[in-house]
Each structure stands twice: as C-alpha cells, then as structure tokens.
Amino acid sequence: MKSKKPVFTKEDVGCYGDSSRGRYLVDRVVELAEDHAGFDPFPAEAEEHDPRDFPGGSLADYEYSDELWDDAVEHLQAVTEDGVYWGTNENGDFGLWEVEE
C-alpha cells in the first residue's frame, strides 16, 4: 500500500549502500527502512532479539537476514513514488533506482 505522499521520489535516486559492505549491507537496508518507513524488524512481541543489541552484533549474523532484507525493501517501496524502485544495481550497490522502460 502506497502512502499518500511519497517519502522517496525520483529526486532521491542514488546509492544508499555500497556493495563493499558485503553481507553486512543488510544492516544498512534495515536501518533505512526503520528510519524512513516505520519498519520494526523485532517488535516487542517477537521471540527473537535484535543481534545489533549485542556488542559487535550484525543482522548479517541473524538466521533470517534474507527475510529481513526483503521485508525492509517492501516497507521502503511502500513509501516510494512510482517509477523508482529499491534494489541492487549491476555492481551490487543498494539504492533507489529509476525504472527503465
């Protein structure tokens, strides 16, 4: 479901997480969704604990990091105007990109 006024537009297109982060890029993707799309990967009623709460913890170490990535992207896309999408480019960088027609 799209929000009435998008948080992200074509003016925001660009890289938001460099592929040099490797598997730790999931931390950046979830952080963006938490900050801008109201994503809560570990709600209070969840049985899991956020691995970032522990020293040196990363979501990359979490068993379900792929699912967190997908859910975070879904939340980001919900607050993004049509014509742009969240994902990785040919270099593996995560960002907001224009849909090529």
Image (cartoon, rainbow, N blue to C red):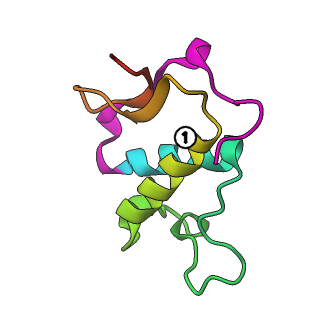
Residue 81 magenta-highlighted: no
Query: Image height check: is 7 above or below 66?
Result: above
Q: Residue placed at 22% from the left, 26% from the top? A: 90
* Residue 16 visible, this orientation: no
Q: Residue placed at 65% from the left, 50% from the top? A: 34
Q: Residue furthest bottom?
A: 47
* Residue 39 visible, this orientation: yes
Name the spot of residue 9 as percent of width and height, x first. Answer: 62, 21
Quarter of the image for the C terminus: give it: top left
Could you say which is closer to the camera, residue 18 or residue 39?
Answer: 39
Q: Which residue is mark 1?
A: 77
Q: Residue placed at 51% from the left, 50% from the top? A: 74
Could you say which is closer to the camera, residue 90 or residue 5?
Answer: 5
Query: Image height check: is 33 above or below 56?
Result: above
* Region rendered in magenta: 1-23
Residue 12 magenta-highlighted: yes
Taking 39 as reference, is 69 left or right?
Answer: left
Query: Image height check: is 88 above or below 47?
Result: above
Q: Residue placed at 29% from the left, 43% from the top? A: 22
Q: Residue furthest right?
A: 4
Query: Image height check: is 42 above or below 45?
Result: above
Quadrant of residue 94 in the image?
top left
Could you say which is closer to the camera, residue 71 or residue 65?
Answer: 71
Name the spot of residue 24 as percent of width and height, x first. Answer: 38, 49
Name the spot of residue 60 as percent of width and height, x first. Answer: 38, 60
The amino acid pointed to by label 1 is Gln
